[in-house]
Amino acid sequence: AFENVPRAPDVPIYAVMVAYKEDTSPVKLNLGMGVYRSEEGKPHLPNVVRQAEQLLVNDLSTDKEYLPITGIVQFNKLSAKLIFGADSPAIKENRVITVQCVSGSGSLRIGADFLAKHYHQPTLYLSQPTYQNHLSVFTAAGLAMKTYRYYDPNTHGLDFQGMLEDLGAASFGSIVLLQVCGHNPTGVDPTPEQWEQIRQLMRLKGLFPFFDCAYQGFVTNLDADVLPVRLFIADGGECLVAQSYSKIMGLYGERVGTLSIVCKTSDVASSIESQLKLIIRPLYSNPPIHGASIVTAILKDREMYSQWAAELKVMTDRIASLRQQLYNALLDRGTPGDWSHITRQVGMYTLTGLNAEQVAFMTKEYHIYMSSDGRMNMAGLSSKTIPYLVDGIHAAVTL
Ligand code: PMP
């Protein structure tokens, strides 16, 4: 029955992961997939997450029966509070509906399906470039994709003028996907003043914001990083927000996230919730319990919350220090080129400026793995591996 099914190409970032696993070299280095690794290059689970998990295991009153279609009620409330702020007027006025989804990706998809079904404008703008899966998720939902300028390869920074021009030229009501902080793959975020300008322009043009938040706390701290979301909500307007707990709690494979829709009134929010149930039910019926229970245990407990924030800060500071160390090492080595963008860019990723050919060379000759667009997962590095990476980069750019 399936003889004529053509073979699809591999998903690039997973292909990098497989190639790395198959490489038998003892010096191999994986800077591909966005996961936080310890100084020893090992997967990292925050202590507070382990503790919360232990509490759950020891709690004999818990069971594994089905959750409601929209997930754990308390998890949704706490997640909304985490991103919108404890005294968000939108929460107080019951204008926000938050549903537990299958991590950031699943939340984006439920949001995309909702927009495709209930929003009058099917055009969605993505930053150029953006997270690889955005294109697939929104295409699968049937939205029409356009891009706005975002990254300037010459400055390795924000093309703010280009961004404003493209958003200014978008047709009224278009949806705009905005990454909240620690932009993937560029590591380039607008400043607070620029966010305010973006907000004004988007509200003026009736452009609909869809925020993707996968790195809250990975740039500065849990509050400062979500300033753009809070700015857009303070004006009383609407938006969609997808949240992921993959990176910020190390819960990658547990698939924990939410979709929130901020509405004009609580009546609208309640109708929207009923519609979200209709979208979720035929997809996977209801979400998984375990990961969201861990998050709930941490967010509801003042002490655990503080411990989490502190552990997150250690991770964030370590990434910043790795940026500085890599930059210094390239400078010391006299590697040609201006590498200052490594310390200017923020969050988990750096778009190095290395091209596909140079990346392929580093993989072949140095067993260093990264995305072919030159994106490097800074959190895959360590002080020990930086000298070797610098050898690889130096050789690649002096070919
Ligand atoms: N959005 C962005 C910008 C991301 O970088 C990622 C993860 N790499 C996601 C969403 C989704 O991740 P997950 O499905 O693991 O939550």
Image (tube, rainbow, N blue to C red):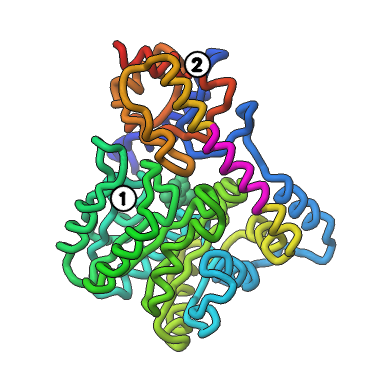
Determine the residue positioned at 53% across, 78% down: 91
| Residue 232 image label | none
Nearest the viewer among 150 and 250 is: 150
> Is any part of residue 12 visible from this angle?
no
Query: Residues under labels 1 and 2: Cα distance?
Result: 34 Å
- Asked if the residue at tag 2 contacts the one at tag 1, i.e. Cβ–Cβ closer than 8 Å, the answer is no
Please provide percent x and percent y for residue 6: 29, 37
Kind of residue indicated by mark 2:
Tyr
Magenta run includes residue 315: yes
Tell me: residue 20, above or below residue 108.
above
Q: Is residue 73 left or right of residue 223?
A: right
Looking at the figure, which quarter contains the C terminus?
top left
Q: Callout 2: helix, strand or loop? A: helix
Nearest the viewer among 262 and 188 is: 188
Kind of residue indicated by mark 1:
Leu
Query: Residue 209 appears in which quarter of the rendering?
Result: bottom left
Looking at the figure, which quarter contains the N terminus?
top left
Q: Main secondary structure of the magenta part?
A: helix
Determine the residue positioned at 41% across, 62% down: 228
User: Which span of residues is magenta-colored?
Assistant: 309-321
The local crowd at label 1, few if under 14, some if 14 to 19, many if 20 or more residues have their Cα within 10 Å, is some
Which residue corresponds to mark 1?
A: 135
Which residue corresponds to mark 2?
A: 388
Query: Residue 113 appears in which quarter of the rendering?
Result: bottom left
Indicate which label's residue lies in the foreground, 1 or 2: 2
